[in-house]
């Protein structure tokens, strides 16, 4: 018998605050989703959801979410075509699982 975890209600206000916090962090630092999850204390998967939303909304102003592509540490393959913000698990060239995670930052573009 499976028990479904009860999801706590999340007011929009709280989400806004987390996004604002993530944006403030990325304006100062270049971080991976894992780094952000440590700072904000939410799961890495949730960070990726927030980043996807930030990416969509932030480009309306002069702030831009910059993504440094994931890269294979073994052969140097760059995951350029990858739109997803999550980390790829394996290199398609050498099948190594040593992947440098994507890094995120927010910069003002004039
Ligand atoms: Zn590789």
Image (cartoon, rainbow, N blue to C red):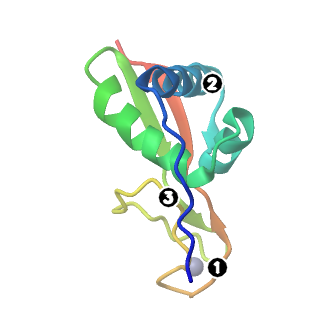
Measuring from the top left, give residue 25's x and y in whole percent.
Answer: 63, 24
Q: Residue at x 72, y 34 (%)?
A: 39
Ligand 1 location (quadrant)? bottom right
Q: Is residue 99 above or below residue 108?
A: below
Which residue position is annotated with label 2? Answer: 25
Mark 2 Cα-neighbour bin, 10 Å: few <14, some 14–19, many ≥20: some
Q: Residue at x 45, y 36 (%)?
A: 66
Which residue position is annotated with label 3? Answer: 86
Mark 1 Cα-neighbour bin, 10 Å: few <14, some 14–19, many ≥20: some
Which residue position is annotated with label 1? Answer: 97
Q: Residue at x 46, y 22 (%)?
A: 16
Measuring from the top left, give residue 8's x and y in whole percent.
Answer: 54, 42
Mark 3 Cα-neighbour bin, 10 Å: few <14, some 14–19, many ≥20: many
- Quadrant in which the N terminus appears: bottom right
Q: Is mark 2 within 8 Å of ligand 1?
A: no
Q: Secondary structure at mark 2?
A: helix
Asked where in the image residue 89 lies, by quadrant, the reply is bottom right
Nearest the eye: 23 or 8: 8
Q: Is residue 61 left or right of residue 70?
A: left
Measuring from the top left, give residue 74's x and y in whole percent.
Answer: 67, 76
Q: Is residue 66 above or below residue 3?
A: above
Furthest residue in direction front, as rendered:
1
Measuring from the top left, give residue 78's x and y in whole percent.
Answer: 48, 65
Q: Secondary structure at mark 3?
A: loop
Q: Residue at x 56, y 63 (%)?
A: 71
Marks 2/3: CA distance? Answer: 18 Å
């Amino acid at each position: 018998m499976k028990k479904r975890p009860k999801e706590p209600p999340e007011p929009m206000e709280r989400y806004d605050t987390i996004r604002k916090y993530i944006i403030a962090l990325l304006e100062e630092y270049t971080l991976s989703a894992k780094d952000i999850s440590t700072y904000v204390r939410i799961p890495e998967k949730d960070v990726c959801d927030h980043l996807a939303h930030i990416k969509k909304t932030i480009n309306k102003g002069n702030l831009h979410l910059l993504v440094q592509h994931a890269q294979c540490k073994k052969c140097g393959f760059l995951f350029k075509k990858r739109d997803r913000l999550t980390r790829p698990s394996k290199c398609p060239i050498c099948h190594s699982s040593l992947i440098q995670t994507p890094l995120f930052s927010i910069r003002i573009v004039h």
